[in-house]
Image: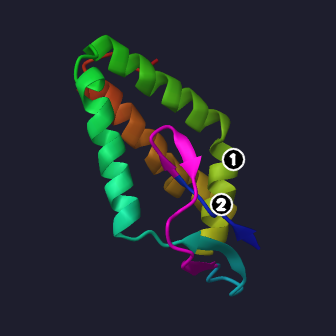
Amino acid sequence: MQNLGKFYIGGAWVAPFSSATTPLINPANEDNIADVPMGDARDVNAAVAAAKAVFPSWSQTTVHERAALLRRLLHLYNEAYDEIAELMTREMGTTIGFSKTAQAAVGRMHIEAAIEALDVDCH
């Protein structure tokens, strides 16, 4: 069983304020595959404060800078594609084939659509 234990806030992995967790159950075999931390209002406030802090600089980035970051994200997603599909299989109880061709593919398509929305070639 995996304990995820942290949130990504403000560019760093941080421990949640609350120790509450919820089990993530594989519906195919009912194994507990992870204990997911449950944030509370303090975690939300920390995430909002981090977003507000970075907004002035982020709002000044160009379309090309944002597209470059999305291309980098797409590259990282594609590198981890098999692992993402495997995790989706465990979380949803689907076959690995379905996870690769449908579930994980949706994440890739969303990133590609964001790049295309910036009117930038994603290849």
Q: Which quarter of the image is occupied by the N terminus?
A: bottom right
Disc nearer the start of the sequence (2/1): 1
Q: What residue is shown with label 1?
A: 82
Pick the residue in front: 14 or 95.
14
Crowding at label 1, few (<14), some or many (≥20) Cα neighbours within 10 Å?
some
- Disc 2 versus disc 1: distance between alpha carbons? 9 Å
Crowding at label 2, few (<14), some or many (≥20) Cα neighbours within 10 Å?
some
The residue shown at (29%, 24%) is: 58
Side of 75 where 10 appears, left or right? left
The residue shown at (44%, 49%) is: 106
Q: What residue is shown with label 2?
A: 87
Q: Amino acid at mark 2?
A: Leu
The residue shown at (69%, 50%) is: 83
Which residue is most to the bottom?
30
SS of the residue at dot 2?
A: helix
The structure's colour scheme is rainbow
Stretch of the chain drawn in magenta: 8-25
Residue 25, image x, y percentages: 62, 81
Q: Amino acid at mark 1?
A: Asp
